[in-house]
Image: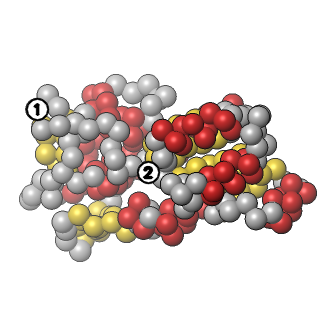
Amino acid sequence: MTIETPPSLTPYILVVEDEESLATLLQYNLEKEGYLIELCADGEEALMMIEERQPDLVILDWMLPKVSGIEICRRLRQRGATRNLPIIMLTARGEETDRIRGLDTGADDYVVKPFSMTELCARLRAVLRRIRPGLAEDRVRAGDIIIDRVAHKVKRAGEEIHLGPTEFRLLDYFMQHPGRVFSREQLLNAVWGSDVYVETRTVDVHIGRLRRALGSESDPIRTVRSAGYSLDI
Ligand code: CA
């Protein structure tokens, strides 16, 4: 039995943004959505990080110190390995947006600041869905469980299951990685976020609620002693 970290099925997103408060906000919200996030504040460093480990998607600010977002985008499109790397460009409202749209930068989408997290997440899912369908499915099935991320509904064996928001995120996370064992700490980071202080015992409480909601006839969640939990279905 191995506990892998970070899980390879989690989309890895590099956020290139020099405005620290926005970068932190993006990290917090995107980690809550189940993405693995790395932050980077300058263009040159971003290019190096991408070379070292290619992300599934890059969120790229247009105005950056040293190398601009546009220039990074151009360079990535010139390299074979990153030619099709999904890029969402962040721009400021106003003429910058018109300018950026007029340029053929090769970005997959543009989001205008200030934006809501809901909007950004929707754009992000749309880009991921277009490029890597498996990463952003709205409806995911594991065994007799179906989770609908858009409608926020869960069904088991055709019956609707009512879950609280935390139980929903837990189940969603398990369903992205069926059969994989996660420690309580990994579940905390993935579902609650790494910067939220929650006791690991809390995980057990919510696992208990999730189990009860899913019905006791066949428990799909396996407790792995001294390791954590997995979805075995
Ligand atoms: Ca900036």
Task: Find disc 2 in the rendering and name its residue.
Answer: 11
Above or below, 126 relative to 177 = below
Task: Find disc 1 in the rendering and name its residue.
Answer: 225
Identify the residue at image location x=51%, y=70%: 130
* Quadrant housing residue 213: bottom left
Q: Quadrant of the C terminus?
A: bottom left
Note whether residue 141 is visible. Answer: yes
Q: Quadrant of the N terminus?
A: top left
In the rendered image, residue 196, in percent from the top left (x then y), is placed at 47, 29
In the rendered image, residue 76, in percent from the top left (x then y), is placed at 62, 52
Question: Is residue 224 found left or right of 150 in the rendered image?
Answer: left
Question: Is residue 218 found left or right of 129 in the rendered image?
Answer: left
Identify the residue at image location x=49%, y=66%: 131
Identify the residue at image location x=74%, y=49%: 71
Q: Secondary structure at mark 1?
A: loop
* Quadrant housing residue 162: bottom left
Q: CA distance from mark 2 to mark 1?
A: 28 Å
In the rendered image, residue 46, in percent from the top left (x then y), is placed at 61, 38
In the rendered image, residue 165, in percent from the top left (x then y), is placed at 41, 50
Q: Could you say which disc has been placed on residue 71 in the image?
A: none
Question: Is residue 209 found left or right of 92 in the rendered image?
Answer: left
Note whether residue 204 is visible. Answer: no
Q: Secondary structure at mark 2?
A: loop
Mark 2 or mark 1: name the one nearer the start of the chain. 2
* Mark 1 surroundings within 10 Å by alpha-carbon count, few (fewer than 14), some (14 through 19), many (20 or more): few
